[in-house]
Structure formats: structure tokens, C-alpha cells
Amino acid sequence: MAETTGPHGAENDEDTANADVVGMWVTADGHIRQELLPDGRYDEARGTRRSAYTGRYTVTGDHLDYVDDTGFTATGDIRDGVLYHEHLVLYREDKTP
């Protein structure tokens, strides 16, 4: 992933850079589920609380920048197929240990 991506239409070439991050990411215990959508939005559930956090994200290389809909910001990095998002460690849903 070499390009920054954001909320663009599906036919935009920049969206293909999201291919490595788009999908559901979960903590090992399944409590936190973060869905990274192809349009540059995310939806994070915590326990039974759906859409606990929503906002947008951009990707530059293996680095993610998040901006919550309330204005809160956070970052994440993907290393060896694992998403390190602030204090959380998330795995692709189909690869949860």
C-alpha cells in the first residue's frame, strides 16, 4: 500500500490501496470488532455495543490514521498481518488466534 486512501467512490484507483486493510479486525477475545470499510470509514463494536465508535481512516503504507466522528484521533500500524491500534491488538476475523 503506497497511497493514502480516504472516502472515495469504489471505482477510484486509490481504493485499491485499502485492499490489505479492508475487512473485519477483532481482538483475540472477540470483544472488540473493528470493520474497516472500502470507502475509508470504520465501525467499531465493543461487546454488545454496536457502532461504539465510528469515523474515517486513511492508510499510508502500513500506517493508519483514524478520526472518530466526534473528532478524537488515533493511529494504528499493521505488522506481520496484525493491526496494532493504540493499545489494542487486532487480527483479521478469519485469522484470530
Image: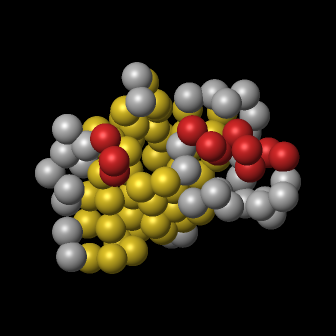
Q: Residue 45 appears in which quarter of the rendering?
A: bottom left
Q: Residue furthest front?
A: 94
- Say above or below: 88 vs 49: above
Q: In this orientation, does residue 68 appear? A: no
In this orientation, which residue lies closer to the viewer: 74 or 40? 40
Is residue 69 shown to the viewer in this render?
yes
Give residue 84's position: percent from left, percent from top.
Answer: 37, 35
Q: Residue 47 appears at what percent x and percent y?
A: 20, 69
- The scheme the figure's colours follow is secondary structure
- Residue 5 placement (x, y as % from top left): 72, 46
Does residue 21 lie above or below 44 as drawn? above
Of 74 and 33, the residue lying toward us: 33
Residue 89 quadrant: top left
Image-based side of 21 in relation to 24, left or right? right
Front position in the image: 87 or 78: 78
For the C terminus, the image quarter is top left
Task: Say which residue appears at 21% left-offset and 76% top-offset.
Answer: 48
